[in-house]
Amino acid sequence: MRSAKGAYLTDADGNTYVDYINSWGPQILGHAHAPVIEAIQKTAEKGTSFGTPTELETQIAELVCSMVPYVDQIRMVNSGTEACMSAIRLARGYTGKEKIIKFAGCYHGHSDSFLIQAGSGAVTFGTPSSPGVTQGTAKDTLLARYNDLASTSSMLEANEGEVAAIIVEPVAGNMGCIPPQPGFLEGLRTLATKHNVLLVFDEVMTGFRLSEGGASTLYGITPDLVCFGKVIGGGLPVGAFAGPREIMSHLAPSGPVYQAGTLSGNPLAMSAGLAMLSELHEKPKIYEQLDGIGSALAQDISTALGERSVVHQINQVGSMLSVHLCESPVTDFDSAKAGDNERFKALFHHMLSLGIYLPPSAYESWFLCACLDDSTHNRTVEAFRSFR
Ligand SMILES: *Cc1c(COP(=O)(O)O)cnc(C)c1O
């Protein structure tokens, strides 16, 4: 790709596409959003990195604390991967326990502990459990089924006193979009508290996307720690992890759990993130708008595929959506894997040839942006209508 503006991408040959990936999440307000670009330009003139905190970093930290109710303190890093990796280290240091529970098909970045039955590109390319991860590391990651409280509960009982954290995508987005079933997040909260385990919400995808306070606010469940990425950087490399002071104070330099980063919190990245979050904070109606775009697409795409008798399932939560070519509802990794992957490839290429840029795998969520309009909607639905 060569450039992008609003809801459109332009490739090296000059073809344009309606973009449903939006850099895998960050561009929730569309590409090259003017306030974000201006903030980056203005900041760049004053120098890009000082290796010491700036007022911009404090401002975005305060803004996040006001947008996400349970967050007192936040640590900036450079990616979602770093955020999850560091949050788990903190959970282990805080609890003095070593094991973690993750859910099959959830993706928490590419650090070793998480590449066990991982979703996203790891499963698309056939390596959900990556070579290069040592058995020593793998043995500390326990695997439960998404939307299955019984599997989580029995795992906690079998490993009583050894589990530091349960990490979960509160709305899964890396095996397609899979909403939590009623009671699942509540149940995880109850189990974590009962077994003295930290509940870590990986909101790298959902944070600032599903609501100002992310999925935790949408579903009314408070985790012990949260990981951010994607939207928080406004298109520059930013991740963050955050939580209440009681836990965050165990982090260096105030506590013993070490974490650091040369470019973490650099002013360029902070200015982009601050411009993005400020706008989302000032215009909270944007979340209703995004949900409207998402539900209209879900409905009309389903009708279009139905007209062609294409067997499908569509999951949608706000500005996350995915189409699975299978008969049964998609509620976990196994049901996501039941889809017809060869047919999905044909669908992807059909759409691409008509100028619609979808995620190239059913194991990825679409990321909708606020620049999508009637024209992109109609073009997309028409393209689905001609799939056979
Ligand atoms: C994208 C993603 C990550 C990893 O973030 P990177 O910035 O790509 O390292 C972690 N968790 C979830 C839920 C994600 O969607």
Image (spheres, rainbow, N blue to C red):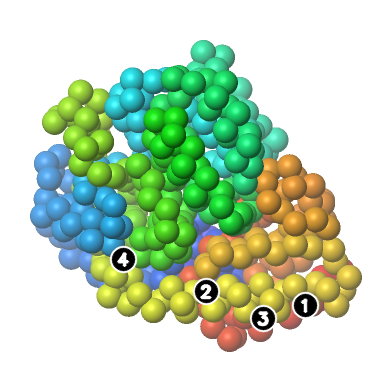
Of helix, strand and loop, which one carries label 2?
A: helix
Report crowding for label 4: few under 14, some 14 to 19, many 20 or more residues within 10 A (C-alpha).
many
Q: Nearer the viewer, mark 4 or mark 2?
A: 2
Spot the residue most to the bottom. Answer: 374
Q: Is residue 321 left or right of residue 187?
A: right
Disc 3 and disc 2: Cα gap in Å?
19 Å
Q: Tell me which amino acid carries mark 2.
A: Asp
Q: Which picture quadrant has residue 311?
A: bottom right
Report crowding for label 3: few under 14, some 14 to 19, many 20 or more residues within 10 A (C-alpha).
some
**Residue where numbered disc 1 is placed:** 303
- Numbered label attached to residue 291: 2
Of helix, strand and loop, which one carries label 4?
A: helix
Q: Tell me which amino acid carries mark 1.
A: Thr
Q: Residue at x 34, y 56 (%)?
A: 232
Contact? badges 4 and 3 (CB < 8 Å): no
**Residue where numbered disc 4 is placed:** 276
- Numbered label attached to residue 379: 3
